[in-house]
Image (cartoon, rainbow, N blue to C red):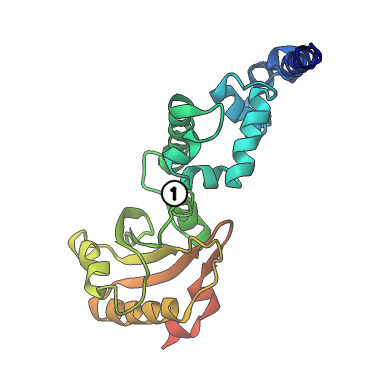
Amino acid sequence: MLVQFYEQVYNYIMVEVAQTHRIQDLNTSERPRERLEKYGAQVLTNGELLAILLRVGIQGRNAVQLGQEILTRFGDLAGIQRAPFSALCEIEGVGPAKAAQIKAAIELGNRLSKESTNERPLVSKPEDAIELVRYELRGKEQEELWVMMLSSRNRMLQIDKLYKGSLNSSSVRIAELFKTAIRINAAAVILFHNHPSGDANESPEDVNLTKTALEAGKMLDIKVLDHIIIGGGDFVSIKKQHPGLWLA
């Protein structure tokens, strides 16, 4: 009898806790959807935005708390972007349907960030180029080497995603870096690659690859404007770090 009594008390407490953690129990002014409608999506935290996608939480945690748990698990939105679909599904209260909604929403944000106006994006400084690639590139789990091609007026023409895996001057075929640039008559290129570790600092291999690309670009009359490394939250311009390479 005593055991049954304790079980009844425990179940009662769990029901009470679950009820106090429902979004419906929050003041209307604190609910994510109502706040979005009244003030706009920009005022919501990442956890609240995820809560809108999740719609409901689980026992003991409302959708906002569950959204925050997902962020904590993967570090940030970029971490969620990098995470395998199966890893999202493993979180209690998520599952395939909600995982798909989260992945789809993040991909929509990614595509929106790359949409251009009627004319091709102008790249007048490294930050302009970085804004066009960093959201997607920093989410990669492997190193990738991309080549951005520019017109003589510094308008972006195309981005080629060429290599995956460890990058160095011996593993990368330099001719491949310029193949499309020659075909579309690009005036200049910018090289990009990511460091999945999050540390954007260049390695000796990165510098050697840049030097080889610069030498090839001079022979082909295609300028190599920079080689930019994307880390977790920052970037490194090899041109800024090693300006002497461009003076050689």
Q: How many marks?
A: 1
Measured along the vertical axis of the image, is residue 122 above or below residue 30?
Answer: below
* 234 left or right of 177 in image: right
In percent of width and height, residue 53 lies at 54, 24
Please, which residue is most extreme toward the left here? 183
Please, which residue is most extreme toward the front here? 1
* 24 left or right of 104 in image: right
In percent of width and height, residue 173 lies at 24, 73
Q: Secondary structure at mark 1?
A: helix
- Which part of the image, by quadrant, shows the C terminus? bottom left
- Asked which quadrant contains residue 73, the reply is top right
Measured along the vertical axis of the image, is residue 132 above or below residue 72?
Answer: below
Please, which residue is most extreme toward the bottom here? 248
Question: Mark 1 sits on what residue?
Answer: 136
Instruction: Please report the residue visible at 42 percent of the width from the left and 43 percent of the height from the top.
Output: 114
In percent of width and height, residue 100 lies at 43, 30
Measured along the vertical axis of the image, is residue 69 above or below residue 5?
Answer: below
- Asked which quadrant contains residue 198, the reply is bottom right
Front in this rendered view, residue 11 or 199: 11
Instruction: Please report the residue visible at 46 percent of the width from the left and 66 percent of the height from the top.
Output: 228
Instruction: Please report the residue visible at 64 percent of the width from the left and 42 percent of the height from the top.
Output: 72
- Asked which quadrant contains residue 10, the reply is top right
- Which part of the image, by quadrant, shows the N terminus? top right
Amino acid found under the numbered disc labelled 1: Glu
Residue 101 seen = no
Instruction: Please report the residue visible at 43 percent of the width from the left and 32 percent of the height from the top.
Output: 104
